[in-house]
């Protein structure tokens, strides 16, 4: 970032594009979100702490962020695999499968939640198979992870696909010519190229899972202290007409996600510089 | 399986000059789509502004079927009486959420909500005149209901009354009282039963309700979510439900699979209705909105109410739709009214939260 | 691919058994989290046969919901597309202070709970909000009307295109654009002829995701919609209504319509790929020379 000043800007359009970006960002995201902050400032410190740090709320942070992290990890690993398979291999119905990856976005989250509950409850297709093994998914914390994995699934796959498609054959050929075997090529050549996108996908899937409401409540069981997510507590605050309490919790979640996303973005940039 | 050819380069397939033409074509077709979209969007608004008077009824979840029927009947009655066409529109959702929407600017002509407490909140913001509850008969509750049990066919766990719900091994389904208005009635019904049985001993009631909720494996966020959990997912032995919801669920989802159990006593739920003064004055619909609500008390209105398993306030309308008798206590006599009940039980840190914080 | 061809490429791809294992793993993963739920949607939708299925889709309230959903997507996707291009260009082609912060802020809408995404607009435009009383005086309706639904949708789908393009354009670097400019192309020419062809894939993915989410958003829209049947109900809200009326067949029929939107994107994507494959790459050089 620091050497950017020294370098002369050859490409045009910096002013207008950055200007428009900041303008639109402010209009759609920052100004509305400031409403959140301002509503919360109506609270005294004590009321704020009571809203965001009661044992039930703290337990819900643990459930929400923990499940979101696990779900995003699952997505990072299997999403990478899926993207690779979808770009590089040919097999029957590939196109169809490729198109279906977007499904978790297209389906209303409530439908996702309801169908997952249908499939994974004790009398459902998967639930009845898992039950003899002693695994209960629906109405347990495991259900939350399943729902969060599903809704975040497209992120890693879709961020990674164009990158894999853009990897030029020459890079791999060069690596192979220099005597690297396939695994070495993957670790030393391909993975570094893919890593920024995997991280992006991970971060987005995580952020999305943290905020998720619609799909999770149908499969979570929503037991206080055990399987209650933070978004649900926001809704319970609203039910009591407690707008400030609701925005206070939302603000805490937002800050936490923001810090995490910022860290990942910085890590990415740093790793790119380091690689160069 | 075989490896597909890797692309030589993602970038080198260039664009011919006709790309610019294409872009402008794209822009044109976009503009066209948006224009068509806008005209479609506006068309219902235009048609609505002619002869028909739209009337928005903002209601809670379990009244969908009731008001679907009632709206037809009222539209017919109004046209016969005044030769004007009214088009009642419905909005449904959780009672609290609906009240919030009205407070935040959803321009309801009338509200028909689950609790007087929710309408009080609207009144506090100045949208409804104080004393609204005295404007219509029976404290503005044109129908009442209560909380009963839905069990699986044959009642295998032999659930007859509230005390059977706390037995070990009985699994009870109810929504979360903090997000569902119906669940608050469930909670208070159980609490009231325990009070009555134990001569008003609050700590015994607390213990009873605590035990009951230990038997609850899932807390859905809304009443209909719970019904689905019980009926479709096969969870639980007994569902605590609105009386009308239980009968509706049986009719819609299988008479041969479930049966209704009416306990010895329960709570009298009085869903209330009100005209939203600020919005009817803005829309010029006061006359029709008031007629809409008072028609609920007419013989025809009460018959429709009874047909949907609500308890009508006029006794003779209920013929043919007899619901089982049971002892009913009111929220005033047991809990001193909604405001007080809410503060004791459902605020953060109230008796409900204490069940889980131990 | 024949065996001899394969031999030549053996260091360029994985051994066949490994390919099989990877593909099967990927499909198993997708199966658990995607195909099973999808199959459940369709099996429920068609539980009573095709008659009730099409009846549910032809219902006037369903048609009104489809119309509203299409309008919402038609407004919000192009706006976010333009933003995405501008943001990606500024962020990847130039260096400036605070870039990390900017990129992170673009991500923010993802991490906001949908309930809150709706609520913030109510806090601003609602009757108790900052602009509510003024809007009310002038008879403008934002929340509990179509503009509010569109605003909430734009907010929720805000990052998609930008987020898809940034890593891709980052990976591309700036050399080609710089070369084009040196060769005398104008800024716009450079963008359309050099940058755009390279990011086409990512752009299409971004738009597809943005569109899918715009049509499928439930939570945020639910808060600002007011749920007036036939007037402010989008498809996802209509699904909820039907589900709450115990009309599971109709609910899943409408949901399956949304699922098929994902399938329709397949066609769009295949089309762009097919068109590109047909175009000779010489045009690129020609365009630059001119």
Image (spheres, coloured by chain):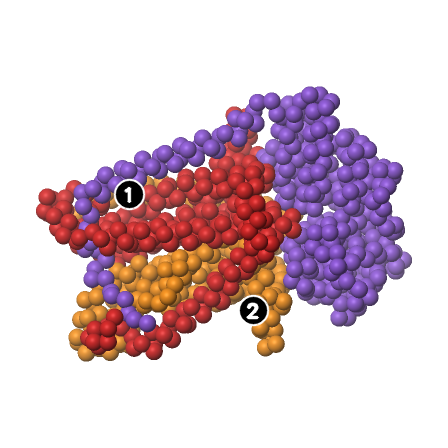
Chain colours: A orange, B purple, C red
B189, A261: nearer the viewer = B189
Residue B276 pos. (x, y %): 67, 31
On-image quarter of the N terminus of chain A: bottom left
Q: Does C55 appear above or below B5?
A: above
Closest to the observer: B38 or A54? B38
User: Does C109 sit above or below residue C78?
Assistant: below
**Front-most of A29 and C67?**
C67
The crowding category of the residue bearing disc 1, from other C-alpha atoms within 10 Å (few below 14, some 14 to 19, many at least 20), is many
Tell if the residue under mark 1 belongs to the same chain as the one under mark 2. Answer: yes
Lateral position of residue C260 relative to residue B77, left or right: left
Residue A126, which numbered label? 2
Crowd tier of the residue under label 2, counting other residues whose Cα lies within 10 Å: few below 14, some 14–19, many 20 or above? some
Label 2: element kind = helix
Nearer the camera: disc 1 or disc 2? 2
Q: C141 and B20: which one is in front?
A: B20
Mark 1 vs mark 2, CA separation in Å: 49 Å
In the picture, residue A214 is in which quadrant? Answer: bottom right
Q: Is residue A157 left or right of residue C199?
A: right
Q: Which residue is mark 1?
A: A17
Report the residue at 77% width, 70% height from top.
B168
């Amino acid at each position: 970032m620091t050497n950017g000043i020294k370098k002369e800007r050859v490409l045009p359009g910096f002013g207008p594009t950055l200007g428009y970006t900041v303008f639109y960002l402010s209009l759609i995201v920052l100004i509305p979100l400031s409403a959140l902050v301002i509503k919360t400032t109506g609270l005294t410190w004590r009321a704020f702490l009571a809203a965001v740090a009661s044992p039930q709320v703290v337990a819900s942070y643990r459930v929400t962020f923990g499940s979101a992290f696990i779900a995003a990890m699952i997505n990072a690993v299997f999403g990478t695999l899926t993207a690779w398979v979808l770009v590089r291999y040919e097999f029957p119905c590939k196109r169809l499968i490729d198109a279906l990856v977007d499904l978790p976005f297209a389906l209303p989250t409530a439908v996702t939640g309801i169908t997952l509950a249908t499939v994974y409850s004790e009398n459902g297709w998967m639930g009845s198979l898992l039950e003899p093994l002693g695994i209960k998914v629906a109405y347990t914390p495991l259900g939350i992870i399943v729902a969060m994995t599903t809704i975040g699934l497209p992120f890693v796959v879709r961020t990674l696909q164009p990158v894999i498609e853009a990897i030029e054959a020459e890079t791999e050929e060069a690596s192979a010519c220099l005597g690297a075997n396939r695994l070495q090529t993957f670790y030393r050549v391909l993975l570094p190229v893919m890593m920024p996108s995997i991280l992006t996908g991970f971060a987005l899937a995580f952020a999305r899972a943290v905020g998720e409401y619609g799909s999770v409540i149908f499969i979570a069981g929503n037991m206080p202290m055990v399987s209650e997510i933070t978004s649900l507590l926001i809704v319970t605050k609203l039910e009591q007409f407690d707008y400030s309490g609701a925005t206070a919790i939302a603000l805490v979640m937002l800050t936490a996600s923001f810090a995490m996303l910022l860290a990942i973005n910085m890590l990415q940039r740093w790793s790119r510089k380091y690689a160069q | 399986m075989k490896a597909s050819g890797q692309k030589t380069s993602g970038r080198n397939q260039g664009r011919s000059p006709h790309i610019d033409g294409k872009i402008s074509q794209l822009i044109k077709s976009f503009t066209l789509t948006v224009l068509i979209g806008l005209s479609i969007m506006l068309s219902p608004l235009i048609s609505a502004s002619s002869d028909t008077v739209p009337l928005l009824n903002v209601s809670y979840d379990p009244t969908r079927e009731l008001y679907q029927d009632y709206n037809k009947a009222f539209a017919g009655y109004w046209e016969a009486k005044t030769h004007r066409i009214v088009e009642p529109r419905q909005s449904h959702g959780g009672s609290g959420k609906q009240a919030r929407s009205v407070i935040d600017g959803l321009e309801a002509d009338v509200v028909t909500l689950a609790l007087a407490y929710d309408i009080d909140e609207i009144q506090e913001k100045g949208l409804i005149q104080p004393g609204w509850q005295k404007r219509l008969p029976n404290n503005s509750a044109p129908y009442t209901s209560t909380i009963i049990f839905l069990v699986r066919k044959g009642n295998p766990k032999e659930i007859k009354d509230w005390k059977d719900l706390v037995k070990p091994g009985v699994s009870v389904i109810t929504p979360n009282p903090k997000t569902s208005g119906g669940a608050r009635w469930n909670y208070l019904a159980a609490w009231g039963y325990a009070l009555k049985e134990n001569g008003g001993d609050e700590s015994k009631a607390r213990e009873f309700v605590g035990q009951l909720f230990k038997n609850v494996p899932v807390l859905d966020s809304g009443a209909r979510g719970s019904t689905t959990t019980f009926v479709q997912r096969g969870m639980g032995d007994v569902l605590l439900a609105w009386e009308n919801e239980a009968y509706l669920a049986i009719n819609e989802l299988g008479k041969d699979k479930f049966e209704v159990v009416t306990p010895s006593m329960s709570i009298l739920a009085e869903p209330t209705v009100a005209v939203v003064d600020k919005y009817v004055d803005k829309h010029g619909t006061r006359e029709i909105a008031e007629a809409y609500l008072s028609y609920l008390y007419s013989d025809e209105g009460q018959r429709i109410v009874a047909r949907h398993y609500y308890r009508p306030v006029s006794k003779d309308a209920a013929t043919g739709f007899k619901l089982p008798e049971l002892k009913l206590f009111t929220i005033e006599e047991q809990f001193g009214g909604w405001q007080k009940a809410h503060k004791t039980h459902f605020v953060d840190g109230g008796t409900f939260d204490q069940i889980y914080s131990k | 691919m024949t065996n001899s061809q394969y031999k030549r490429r053996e260091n360029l791809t994985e051994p066949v058994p490994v390919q099989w294992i990877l593909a099967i793993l990927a499909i198993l993963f997708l199966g658990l989290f995607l195909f099973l739920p999808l199959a459940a949607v369709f099996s429920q939708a068609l539980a009573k046969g095709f008659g009730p299925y099409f009846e549910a889709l032809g219902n006037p309230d369903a048609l009104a919901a489809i119309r509203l959903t299409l309008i919402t997507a038609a407004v919000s996707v192009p706006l976010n597309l333009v933003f995405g291009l501008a943001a990606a260009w500024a962020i990847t082609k130039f260096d400036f202070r605070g870039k990390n912060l900017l990129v992170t802020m673009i991500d923010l809408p993802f991490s906001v709970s949908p309930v809150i995404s709706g609520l913030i607009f109510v806090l601003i435009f609602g009757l108790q909000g900052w602009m509510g009383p003024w809007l009310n005086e002038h008879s403008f309706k934002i929340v509990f009307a179509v503009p509010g639904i569109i605003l909430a949708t734009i907010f929720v789908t805000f990052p998609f295109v930008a987020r898809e393009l940034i890593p891709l354009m980052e990976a591309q670097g700036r050399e080609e654009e710089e070369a084009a400019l040196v060769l005398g192309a104008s800024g716009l020419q450079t963008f359309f002829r050099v940058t755009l062809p390279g990011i086409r894939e990512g752009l299409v993915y971004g738009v597809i995701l943005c569109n899918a989410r715009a049509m499928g958003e439930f939570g945020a829209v639910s808060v600002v919609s007011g749920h007036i049947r036939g007037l402010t109900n989008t498809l996802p809200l209509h699904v909820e209504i039907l589900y709450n009326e115990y009309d599971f067949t109709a609910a899943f029929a409408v949901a399956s319509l949304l699922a098929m939107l994902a399938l329709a994107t397949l066609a769009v994507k295949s089309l762009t790929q097919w068109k590109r494959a047909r175009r000779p790459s010489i045009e690129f050089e020609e365009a630059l020379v001119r």
